[in-house]
Image (cartoon, grey):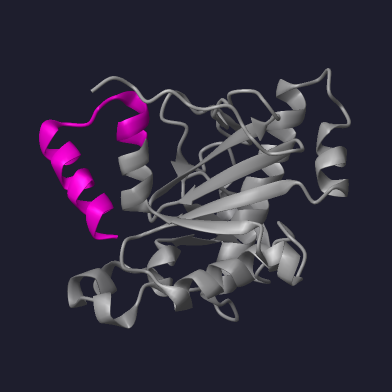
Amino acid sequence: MAPLARSPYTGKSRRLVIAFDIGTTYSGVSYSILTPGEIPDIFPVTRFPHQGHVGGNCKIPTVIYYDKQGKVCVTGIDDLGDFEPDEVENWTKVQWFKMHLRPKSSATSDAADQITPLPPNKTVIDIFVDFMEYLYDCTRKYIQQTFPNQPDFLVSMDRNNAIDFVLTHPNGWEGSQQAQMRQAAVRAKLVPDTDAGRARIRFVTEGEASLHLCIQRGLMTPEMEVNLFALDHFQ
């Protein structure tokens, strides 16, 4: 199957779309600038603090370190070799926190045994807020550095409420999990706490995201095409 050609953006005004793929172990960000009449391109964020250039997979560890006061010390790294031992001695590593948000019906004893307990006085939403803030800050800095000839671009997008967000989540997550992720996005100041602001947050399952990627890159097998045809006709 040949790669699917994108169509020109048909909206009336310029917009920025940012996608957060917050995975259980690794996370990534991509974005697209939508300009009326132009075919959009999708770009990955490939630079993060303490990571340099993260390479072709554009993923960073879904990890946060907190101090005893619950303050974020460092985000998105596993190896603390660049820090002094005395500095990190009292840090608490938080990973696999996404699993705390999973539907109770999907819980298994094996998975529960691997989930890291949350730090004292921290909820899973608090952790999501901190991680989203980090990803958004990195994304904004990356866009500013990538397009230095457009210094007012993000200011214009902010002023016009023209930044949309796409958040991925596992298959099987539904309204409750989406509501909590939306709450975290609002608290992380991705969007304002208004109906219009919350409407700028969209969700896509990880399965859907993978399917779209396969279609976009022309990686569909005949079996996948048959299944997609059947799905389209039963929706």
Q: In x, y percent, where is residue 202? A: 55, 57
Give the position of the C terminus as an image quadrant: bottom left
Residue found at x 36% / y 39%: 212
83 versus 199 height, above or below = above
Q: Nearer the viewer, residue 196 or 123?
A: 196
Name the one closer to the observer, 32 or 3. Answer: 3
Magenta residues? 213-235
Q: Is residue 216 left or right of residue 61?
A: left
Residue 18: name its quadrant: top right
Residue at the spot 31% in from the left edge and 42% down from the top edge: 211
In the image, residue 117 above or below residue 147: below
Q: Residue at x 67, y 66 (%)?
A: 198
Residue 119 makes an appearance in the image = no
Q: Position of residue 37 (x, y in %)?
A: 67, 25
Identify the image quadrant of the N terminus.
top left
Q: Is residue 139 visible?
A: yes
